Image: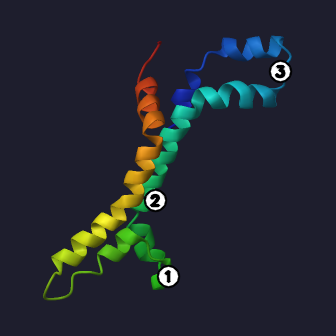
Amino acid sequence: MLKGYIDDIPESLDEAAKMDGCSHIDILWRIIVPLSLPGITVAGFYTFILSWNDFLFVSILSQTAATRTLPFGLQLFPSQNTVAWELLLTAATVAMIPVVVFFAIVQRWVVGGLASGGMKGA
């Protein structure tokens, strides 16, 4: 996911930093990482959403109630004959809160990363 984003960083910045006396680590931390921070944020947010909503993996490996995730626990609300909709919808709303809060925090970088990652030759 990050390969295309990092490939768009001009090599002339690396060459200019080498001419200024930067080591490879300095180039990485002072040039590459700050320029790729929006892409890293998008990849991190995407990974968080995928792991948060991972149902199959948790359903196979979860042995106890302590290892279940919130989305997996939502499927336990309906019983055999009835569905307590008020409890299910309340729990679904509570399960969405961390994702919404995380997106509100990183929204600036996610939008910037998506916009600049989609440009070619800009």
Contact, mark 3 vs mark 1 (Cβ under 8 Å): no
Element type at mark 1: helix
The amino acid at mark 2 is Ser
Q: Residue at x 47, y 39 (%)?
A: 42
In the rendered image, residue 48, in percent from the top left (x then y), is placed at: 47, 53
The amino acid at mark 3 is Cys
Left/right of residue 41 with respect to residue 94 in the rendered view: right
Q: How many marks?
A: 3
Q: Is residue 2 visible?
A: no
Marks 2 and 1 sit apart, C-alpha to C-alpha, by 17 Å
Element type at mark 3: loop
In the rendered image, residue 79, in percent from the top left (x then y), is placed at: 21, 86
Q: Nearer the viewer, residue 8 or 101?
A: 101
Marks 3 and 1 sit apart, C-alpha to C-alpha, by 48 Å
Contact, mark 3 vs mark 2 (Cβ under 8 Å): no
> Label 2, on which residue?
51
Mark before the other along the chain sequence, 3 or 2: 3
